[in-house]
Amino acid sequence: MAYTLKINGRSQTVDVDDDTPLLWVLRDVLGMMGTKFGCGMALCGACTVHLDGQPVRSCITTVDSVGTGEITTIEAIGRTPAGQRIQQAWIDLEVPQCGYCQSGQIMSAAALLAANPRPTDTDIDDAMSGNICRCGTYVRIREGIKRAAAGGSGRTGG
Amino acid sequence: MAQTAGNKAGEQVPTRRDIIRAGVGAGGALFVVFGIPSIAKVVQADAGATARPAPAPAPAPAAAAGPPFMPSGFVRIDPAGTVTLTMPQVEMGQGTYTSMPMLIAEELEVELSQVKLAAAPADDKLYGNPLIGFQVTGGSTSVRGFFKPLRVAGATAREMLIAGAAKTWGVDPASCRAEKGVVVHDASGRRAPYGELVATAAAVAVPTDVKLKDPKSFKLIGTSARRLDVADKTTGRAQFGIDVRLPGLLIATVAASPVIGGKLRSVDDTAAKAVKGVRQIVRLEDAVAVVADHMGAARKGLAALAIVWDEGANAKVGTADVVATLQAATTQSGVVAERKGDVDAAMAAAAKTVEAVYELPFLAHTTMEPMNCTVHLRKDACDLWVGSQVVSRARATAADVTGLPPERIAVHNHLLGGGFGRRLEIDFVTQAVQIAKQVDAPVKVVWSREEDIQHDIYRPYYVDRLKAGLDAGGRPSAFHHRVTGSSIMARWVPAYFKDGLDADAVDGAAGPYDFDNLLVDYVRREPPAGLLTGWWRGVGVTHNAFMVESFIDELAQAAGREPIDYRRALLARQPRARAVLDLVAEKAGWGAPMPKGRGRGVALLFGFGTYVAQVAEVDVSPKGEVRVSRVVCAVDCGITINPDTVRAQMEGGIVYGLTAALYGEITLKNGRVEQSNFDNYQALRINEVPAIEVHIVSSLEEPGGIGEPGTSGIAPALVNAIYAATGKRLRKLPIDGRQLAAT
């Protein structure tokens, strides 16, 4: 059936089965390729998007569960203060290698920073351990989050 | 900002035909640039590759009229001044899309921010890897293979641009110089951007003896120049093969026989066809594909199929069968790979002998981007969109399956969402083209993670036997390493499998040490038919470093010696190996006391032209839980192109190797791979990652590879650290914590 979704501030209508994961609506129906497929079972985090600011795994988020929630994807995360700072830190530290998981990493990190402007190492572990990176960029991901947090000193996150 | 436009579908890349049309480079320059060794020609023939280029996509409109200047397959300058560098090697995270441009830009005298990158089309002649012989990105060969050819390509183009300017100005070329994409004549103050010189440079005879810079005067090489692919990889704009969009594109997903080697018997697709968005069910000999409007429908359709498989000969095969075969084989003598002195006599005369058998499991790769390939097959042509480490082989298999001549097949290569050796295979390309033969539209075939893990081409299972004789002083007077496992070379490049010997399987089998009496032999045993083994990051060196560095630690223990001193004594003629060992010892604080339950372990290796020493620190709980808290790495890779890339590759390589050491194991039951997704084939996560320190030795030696050596040494450093912490020696991976629990 038809669903009208709010994605990155725009309303988009799609006609798919109610149990279709949001990931495929974004990628194959709407052509937004920044959100990635990694496992299909919420085990790797590559498909992370924000639903009302909360990180969710779009591979198991069915289209009928989204309702009127605001979806934000990697294509628009740079418009938020936390997302912008995370992206800049990623560039400064050259975090990505193959880069495939990084949309999901950035979405998880931006959600963390928006909710917690001064994350500790434990906070980072808790927020980021759902995101796998097979290139092993974790050392720089941790540094990147800390840099983005420090860069936002005196301001509240996203 | 530099762009990595070349990874986008339809990007124009120069082909051999273009270059010939441009009137330069068809003769001398190409041969200077592509000095392929003789072995390479044999390999190339085996690969079934052809010298002819894929049809060129329609040229992009140039901002200024006239043909571009293309003195080689690597450099293209159009009249508007755009400098496009065509990348012979693919980018899978290892930094080639920065290191390769750095090599060209250093001599071409352009800024990295001025260049645009394009992915090479399938063409072994133009883009063959000089170290391997055809178009391959693997074996940590990119910088080693292209260090000279790409600098020659840059210098050749620069000299021709200077000659063109000098002719226009009527001055001596020697009085001109190039900087930042401009030819300058200092005496007159005249300047000409490269774009203005395209026509005159193209008319200049191609120089065959360009002089390369002395490494001491490099301006760009050796700096941590910014990666050219990072910006797009932080915004979701980077295009991987799986991201291709085409008009009318359909999406397919596949189930191959869960029993390895099994065939499709029958399938009831009634329920699948009723799924909204499902268009078609495709039957292959050993698989079924569901073709749909989107992946959600394809996956739902696949789940709704009722498939009956003909399980075939492997229906009862289990891991134990494979291991029993290898264990029996390792007691038999093998094909001699290396022999020095007289091992038998030295072993007989030894004061003490030590023997141990080590085992490494089958491993999957689990690249984050699952296998995928997009195919648009028409009556007389075929286009592929893929991320491949072997572009010309992708074309060759498409030619085989379709019956089209290779020149009618265009491969549009993309950024790879991880390679690790998995994308050195073309099985998923072959399958995608087979599916496309039955689909009257462009079709993107995407594997599920389950399919990716259960139909990988696995790192071989190895069972190696090592034996040493120690003299009265504890030094190994005899060293014997028998490698037992399948041969990747025999399947993948038969030309490198000679007289029963697989050169990769025994690579690094004696470590970097000086042994007076040495024997390395190899016993080949293949797993059941249909279970293929292939390259995995670090290849032979990773396997052998685990065996050798574990065993050297056991020898030090048997000799009552400290592990680093013991190794140092075997490196009298290996100054670079000794230097990385000393450096890692110093930086790791080797020898400083550690609390109970904690330990340090070291490993040293030479591989891919690079020396690496690593020290791991571990904490083993009374329950046997292993936590790696710190890894210190010293690396001597000769001339460093980009130090930050070296650090990144060591960091990432260590994580990849630790993942395998702690978790990696593919097992078989009833002919099926038991693992299926990241819950039961785990990857290291951020909360488990140690602090990693990388120290680079400054060197002007020939460049070594850096993609794989970081992975190769970490498993033995880890088991050696566990031994130091617990007194328990693990001879099999992955780490089994139950063996470490306090009793």
Image (tube, coloured by chain):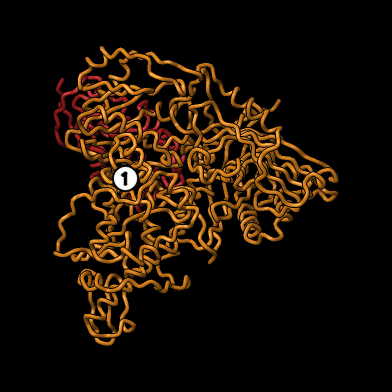
Could you tell whether B355 is left or right of B416 in the image?
right
Circle 1 chain: B
The answer to whether B451 is drawn above or below residue A142 in the figure is above
> What's under tag 1, amino acid-wise?
His
Q: Which color was chain A given?
A: red
Percent position of residue B23, x then y: 25, 66
In the rendered picture, chain B carries what hue?
orange
Picture quarter containing residue B253? top left
Residue B453 pos. (x, y %): 44, 29
Q: Nearer the viewer, residue B96 or B597?
A: B96
Q: Which residue is found at the position 81% from the left and 48% from the top?
A: B474
Asked if residue B199 is positioned above or below residue A44 in the image, the reply reads below
The quarter of the displayed image where residue A35 is located? top left
Left or right: residue B679 versus residue B30 is right
Q: Is residue A83 visible?
A: no
Residue B34: percent from left, percent from top: 40, 60
Q: Residue at x 24, y 42 (%)?
A: A75
Most extreme residue toward the bottom is B187
Note whether B707 is above or below B670 in the view shown: below
Vertical comparison of A141 with B281: above or below: below
Q: In the rendering, at what x and y percent does residue B488 appear?
A: 52, 39
Q: Between residues B592 and B236, which one lies in front from this camera angle?
A: B236
Provide the residue designation for mark 1: B414
Question: In what quadrant of the picture does the C terminus of chain B appear?
Answer: top right
